[in-house]
Amino acid sequence: MHVAPWVWILTLAGILAVILADLLLIHRADGREFTTRRAAFWSVVYLGLAVAFGAGVWAFSGGEHAAQFFGGFVTEKSLSVDNLFVFMVILTRFAVPKASQHTALMAGIVIALVLRGAFIAVGAAALSAFTWAFFVFGAFLLWTAVGLVRGGDDDEFTENRLLKRARRILPTTDAFEGGRLFTRRDGRRMVTPLFIVVLAIGSTDVLFALDSIPAIFGLTTEPYLVFTANTFALMGLVQLFFLLGGLLDRLVYLGRGLAFILGFIGVKLVLHALHEYGVAWAPDVPIWLSLAVIGGTLAATTVASLTVGRRRAGTADPAEGVPVGRDRTE
């Protein structure tokens, strides 16, 4: 897939225009809580943009590349849902006012987009120059999948070195000031706690990229498709955060589903490397099979999670909020 420089330029300009439009809407809505209704509307808009882009890839480059884009988009989106748990912890830990949460998330995602672009460029160059890099990516995904099955600390937040250093050296105000990242006190330029939150979200998302970017390279090695799939998945992540809300707590099997997907793609990368080295028994897994496995796994884990949630709700006394049959005096 050859992508001309002017296509890259138009794509980046379009992405920048969408981000600027979103930021302008944030500015206009500053001080108001981002409601579920608005989140649903913009989630549909961003999903429509991704579908339209995929249709354009199909029209100009064929069904194979379109399938790779949609496979990468669905994979990145599903992995991003897991990131939302940590974002919730960050917003809670820093006690971010609801009216400022959308600003914090959107600014953090913009930082993540820039840093992920650099990661993708490095990964694409490595895979293009060294076939053995597929073994490395595959092994890392398998290791990550095993960690998810054993039970990681996805719902915890640990300050990384960048954030710790920033909190030590940057003069920070004691209170939030709406959606402002910077302010001036007694003639001194200072950052608000919201700036620290943005830095926390952006830098934490880069850590998540360590498994999500190798995962999408297991579906396509085209840098253009990897970048655009990541971009569309991240751009709608803020709206998805407010749309899902409490539903995240009910997706109890999401971690296991993501572990299976990462494990499958890890095996796919290893098989691809063996195939490239001429190993006769190693097949190159087709994209349609990858799409089927990813879609089927997400559907199965979602249905299973929601079914478990309904069963648990059915065993509780709705009036008292305690399990049926238990002594209410306990």
Image (cartoon, rainbow, N blue to C red):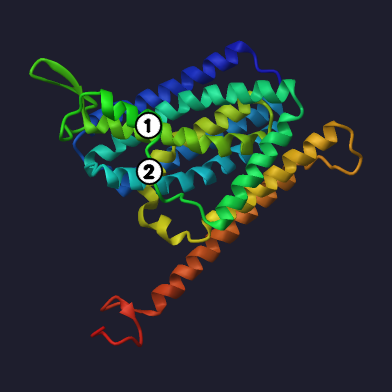
Residue type indicated by callout 1: Gly
Q: Is residue 108 above or below residue 7?
A: below
Residue that mark 1 sits on: 108
Q: Position of residue 99 (x, y in %)?
A: 22, 40
Nearest the viewer among 17 and 125 is 125
Name the quarter where the C terminus is drawn: bottom left
Residue occupied by mark 2:
87
Direction from residue 281 to residue 214 in the image, left or right: left
Query: In this rendering, is residue 4 above or below 253?
Result: above
Q: Residue at x 70, y 26 (%)?
A: 127
Question: Would residue 218 be seen by someone viewing this image from the given angle?
Answer: no
Residue 26, percent from left and from top: 28, 31
Q: Which mark, by number, is residue 191?
A: none
| C-beta proximity under 8 Å, tags 1 and 2 | yes
Q: Number of labelled discs?
A: 2
Residue 328 appears anywhere in the view: yes
Residue that appears at 21% across and 42% down = 97
Mark closest to the chain's N terminus, 1 or 2: 2
On the image, which quarter does residue 57 sit in?
A: top right
Residue at the outermost left position? 186
